[in-house]
Amino acid sequence: EIVMTQSPATLSVSPGEGATLSCRASQSITTNLAWYQQKPGQPPRLLIYGASARAAGFPARFSGTGSGTEFTLTISSLQSEDFALYYCQQYSNWPLTFGGGTKVEIK
Amino acid sequence: EVQLLESGGGLEQPGGSLRLSCAASGFTFSNYAMTWVRQAPGKGLEWVSTISVTGNRIYYADSVKGRFTISRDNSKDTLYLEMDNLRADDTAIYYCAQEAVPGLFEYFQHWGQGSLVTVSS
């Protein structure tokens, strides 16, 4: 099983500042990585796929990079609606696995 | 507009059974693999099971293998999850999710609102 490790668990950021979230895979997954955003009481929402392709409805301030085992989600200038939980997910191998999540909270 | 509507959750005793349904609309259901993902209260996401478009390929997490059965009825645009021998650690919100790319097993474009399953005596 590929273990996905996200860091930090919580990120405290002031509105307007940038945020960098990390996701590490226990073995290479090339670019078979997705990111999801989840707000309280809502299902997850696809944010990034293929490690760097942005899903419909998300602005350009969200960007994903990485390949192999190291991945990054960057939010360039946090808006109020961006404070949420973020999960990475690998789809390289079965079982599909998610990271433990990073909570981006208001500082 | 894609809609996924889960139903069938509720309170069940340990060792009991429940059947979840996910009614799909707004897309050609028979073209997409479908998946169940769960989330225990206050916890992260856990993939549970995926079924191919025809149902000939099925995958389960080790935590549910032998106890849960995924199935689909393409004539009814509905996905199912039969859960037997339930345990307390099966307590979670169960989401059904549509694969993003027709026929492939990758990431999830659309999610339902979820159905809460509580296993407790």
Image (spheres, rainbow, N blue to C red):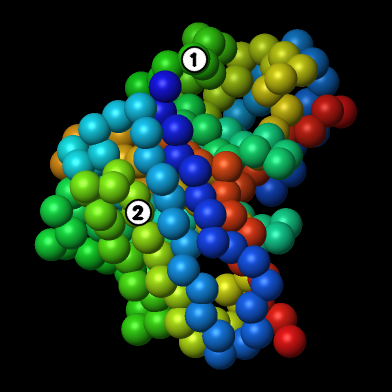
Task: From the top left corner, tell me how far across and down residue B111 is, in percent.
Answer: 47, 40
Task: From the top left corner, tell me how far across and down residue A60 is, in percent.
Answer: 50, 9
Task: From the top left corner, tell me how far across and down residue A37 is, in percent.
Answer: 58, 34
Measure how far apart labels 2 and 1 are at the Cα level. Answer: 27 Å
Task: From the top left corner, tell me how far across and down residue B49 is, in percent.
Answer: 36, 62
The residue sitting at 53% across, 11% down in the picture is: A59
Q: Is residue B71 left or right of residue A11?
A: left
Which residue is disc 2 drawn over?
B79
Q: Is residue A70 left or right of residue B121?
A: left
Considering depth in this image, is A81 or A100 the residue closer to the camera?
A81
Q: Which mark is residue B118?
A: none
The residue sitting at 69% across, 48% down in the picture is: A9
Label 2: which secondary element: strand
Q: Crowding near pointer 1: few (<14 within 10 Å), some, many (20+)?
A: few
Q: Crowding near pointer 2: few (<14 within 10 Å), some, many (20+)?
A: many
Seen as rendered, the residue at the extreme front is: B76
